[in-house]
Structure formats: structure tokens, C-alpha cells
Image: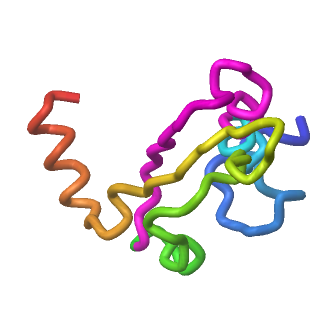
Amino acid sequence: LGTRRRFPQVSANLNVRWCSGALKIDVAAAALRNQTRFLHRRTLVLTGERAGEGAARANYAFFEPHRADARRSSALRRHVDHLRFVQQWSETDVWAILERWRI
């Protein structure tokens, strides 16, 4: 009952927001950190945050090391980069490319 009827909740406070990084972002980071297939390899994580979706997203880097990156670790050598390839696209651009490729 504590999480029902709360989506989408417009708030930065995770105590009142059902949709959180733990349910989306941290899942990928945990998979990258806990699977040996990502060790000693280069991995590119593509995500679809758009700057037009909010002030916080407007400040995200277009390309940066991912939170699961460990390229400087002598033991792990897990090279993970993060690319937000639609960051500067408009919502119209996103819908147009989805339609073009029939997604």
C-alpha cells in the first residue's frame, strides 16, 4: 500500500516517489559490477535522458565514465562509459526516430 498510486510522482524525495534510481539506474550498475563478463572489457552504457525533461538532467554529462567504471583498479579493470545519446534531442525528435524505425 505504501507504493501504490504514486506513479509518476513528481518529487526528488525518494520517500514519496515510487519510481526511483534503485529500481532503474542501480539495477544496471549492480549487473555491471557483479558479472565477470564485464571485467577486462570495454562497455558502453546507452541511456535516454533528455535535458528537456528537467533541470537536473540538463546538467548531466553527455559522455562520462559510468558509476560502475573501475578502469583505474589494478584488480578489476572494468572499463565502462556512459553515453546519453539523446540528451539534446527534443521530445518530437525522439518520437520521430521511434516512428522511423517502427519501434
- Residue 55 in the magenta stretch? The answer is no
Classify residue 6 as left or right of residue 87.
right
- Regarding residue 6, the answer to whether it shows in the image is no
Classify residue 97 as left or right of residue 38.
left
- Residue 35 in the magenta stretch? The answer is yes
Its colouring scheme is rainbow
Please state the horizontal and vertical placement of residue 27, each as a whole percent of the image.
72, 34
Range shown magenta = 28-51
Identify the residue shown where x is 23% and y is 29%: 103
Task: Report the number of numbered marks.
Answer: 0
Quarter location, residue 9: bottom right
- Regarding residue 100, the answer to whether it shows in the image is yes
The N terminus lies in which quarter of the figure? top right
Classify residue 71 as left or right of residue 96.
right
Identify the residue shown where x is 66% and y is 35%: 28
Please state the horizontal and vertical placement of residue 17, each as a whole percent of the image.
77, 55
User: 56 or 81, which lies in front?
Assistant: 81
Q: Residue furthest left?
A: 100
Please state the horizontal and vertical placement of residue 88, each as a whole percent of the image.
31, 70
Identify the residue shown where x is 71% and y is 28%: 31
